Image (cartoon, rainbow, N blue to C red):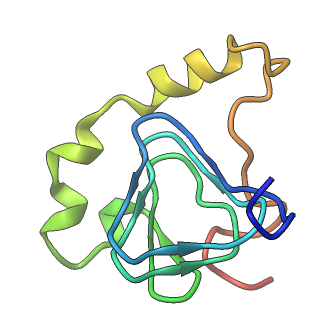
Amino acid sequence: MGRCGGVSADIDDHAFVGWGAVIVGGVNIGPGAYVCSGALITRDVPAGYIAYDRNKIIHPGEWPGALGKSPFFQLTVAEDLATASDDGAGGRGPRQPATGRPGHSS
């Protein structure tokens, strides 16, 4: 529990959270996800995705700059997911968005 009695974020292995980013509530930041500096995130970020601005979440291949081609995303997310399914979480692995495409409203 956080200092205010709220629910803490769950940040998985190999995820990066930039300086000044704010992650609110029981959000899951998946393995190999990248949260940009100054982002405000209140929704789950899937494994290997980039989160920026206010809840904007995209696949690295859609990122217009060099970040999407960074060696950071060369990590094998599939290996992380396999490990997560063997971690006692009942094979669930990291949580994914409930509906629709990540970063888009349904």
The quarter in which the C terminus is drawn is bottom right
Identify whether 72 is placed above or below 51. Answer: above
Q: Position of residue 58 (x, y in %)?
A: 47, 70
- Quadrant in the picture for residue 88: top right
Number of numbered discs visible in the structure rendering: 0
Tell me residue 43's x, y (percent): 70, 70
Judge left or right: residue 78 versus residue 71: right
Q: Who's the residue at 74% across and 85% down the image?
A: 105
Above or below for 89 versus 52: above
Image coords of residue 80 (percent x, y): 49, 25
- Residue at image point 16% right, 44% down: 71
Residue 8 x %, y %? 73, 56
Residue 32 picture quarter: top left
Residue placed at 30% from the left, 33% from the top? 75
**Residue at 66%, 81% in the rendered image:** 104
Along the horizontal axis of the image, is 30 left or right of 16? right
Q: Nearer the viewer, residue 58 or 24?
A: 24
Vertical side of 65 occupied by 83: above or below: above
User: In the visual, does 36 lie left or right of 6?
Assistant: left
Who is closer to the viewer here, 65 or 3? 3
Q: Residue furthest front?
A: 3
